Every structure is written in C-alpha cells, then in structure tokens.
C-alpha cells in the first residue's frame, strides 16, 4: 500500500433476500467500498454493537425481524449518529414515515453509479448533515 492509498468507506448491507444482498455487496466492492452483510435489522444492530468502523448502512425497507429499514435508520441515527443510512425499496418511500437526518432514499432497481453517488454525498457532505 502506498501513501496514496485511502481507507475505503465501510458499508453494512442489510437485505433479507440473498441474491439482492449479493448484488449490493458486489456493487459496493466494485465501487471501492468495503461491504459487510446482514440479513435483517437485528443482525445489523449486533454487528454495529461489535464494530466501530462502519460509516454507511444500506438497508431495504421491508425485512423480517423486529425492525424494518426505516426503523433501523432511526435506531442508527439515535445510537450511532455519525453513521449515514441509505434506505432502499422497490416500493415507493412510505410517505407517512420521513427518514431521519443523515439518511436518503434510493428506489430499486438502482444502478451502481447511484449507490456510489449516494455514499459519497452522505459521507463527504460538509457537516455530514441530512440530504
């Protein structure tokens, strides 16, 4: 590793559908990010409690378990306020549940360039506020 090497952004991919999760992991790693996987929000919280290096959560809205993706975004914002969240769904974003600060919605199907742009926008934004 040379001096020009930068630490990649570490993202936690939270998706219950295996093939969709594998596609998201491939998109993240092909874009130069490090990807960690979780099959649901409960597993994601366990991972977050054991690691301090995750910068972005990429989560589906509809998942089995005690929390959906929007609820996970609120838990993350409250417990780990420096972590940014991208919430995704093939359905439209539920209008009655706005996302917390530091989060954004990305509709499925998504392109790898959309994910890369969203991660960079959230992690490089001045003050890293809500987008």
Image (spheres, rainbow, N blue to C red):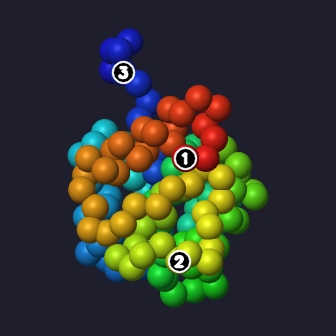
Q: In the shown orientation, is residue 15 left or right of residue 50?
A: left
Q: Residue 126 is drawn in which quadrant?
A: top right
Q: What separation in Å lies between label 2 and label 1 (alpha carbons)?
A: 17 Å
Q: Are marks 2 and 3 in contact (CB under 8 Å)?
A: no
Q: Which mark is residue 131?
A: 1
Depth check, mark 3 against mark 1: the one in front is 1
Residue 69, given in percent of the width and then of the height, sits at 54, 72
> SS at mark 1?
loop
Q: In terms of depth relative to the viewer, which is nearer, 66 or 38?
A: 66
Q: Which residue is mark 2?
A: 94
Q: In terms of depth relative to the viewer, which is nearer, 31 or 61?
A: 61
Q: Which residue is mark 3?
A: 5
Residue 23, given in percent of the width and then of the height, sits at 25, 64
Q: Residue 78 is drawn in which quadrant?
A: bottom right
Q: Is residue 41 visible?
A: no
Count of numbered marks: 3
Residue 49, given in percent of the width and then of the height, sits at 68, 59
Q: Give the mark nearest the N terminus, 3 or 1.
A: 3
The residue that appears at 40% across and 61% down in the rendered structure is 106
Q: Residue furthest top?
A: 3
Q: Give the mark nearest the N terminus, 2 or 1.
A: 2
Q: In the shown orientation, is residue 107 left or right of residue 103?
A: left
> SS at mark 3?
loop
Q: What separation in Å lies between label 2 and label 3 (alpha carbons)?
A: 40 Å
> SS at mark 2?
loop
70 in relation to 24, above or below: below
Q: Give the mark nearest the N terminus, 2 or 3.
A: 3
The residue that appears at 70% across and 49% down in the rendered structure is 81
Mark 2 surroundings within 10 Å by alpha-carbon count, few (fewer than 14), some (14 through 19), many (20 or more): few
């Amino acid at each position: 590793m040379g001096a020009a090497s930068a630490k990649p952004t570490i993202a936690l991919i939270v998706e219950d559908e295996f093939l969709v999760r594998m596609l998201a992991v491939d998109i993240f790693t092909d874009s130069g990010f490090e990807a960690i996987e979780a099959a649901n929000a409960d597993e994601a919280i366990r991972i977050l409690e054991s690691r301090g290096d995750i910068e972005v959560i990429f989560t589906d809205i509809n998942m089995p378990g005690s929390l959906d993706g929007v609820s996970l975004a609120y838990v993350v914002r409250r417990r780990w306020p420096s972590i940014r969240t991208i919430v995704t769904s093939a359905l439209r974003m539920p209008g009655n549940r706005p996302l917390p600060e530091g989060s954004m919605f990305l509709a499925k199907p998504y392109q790898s360039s959309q994910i890369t742009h969203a991660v960079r926008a959230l992690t490089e934004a001045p003050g890293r506020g809500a987008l």
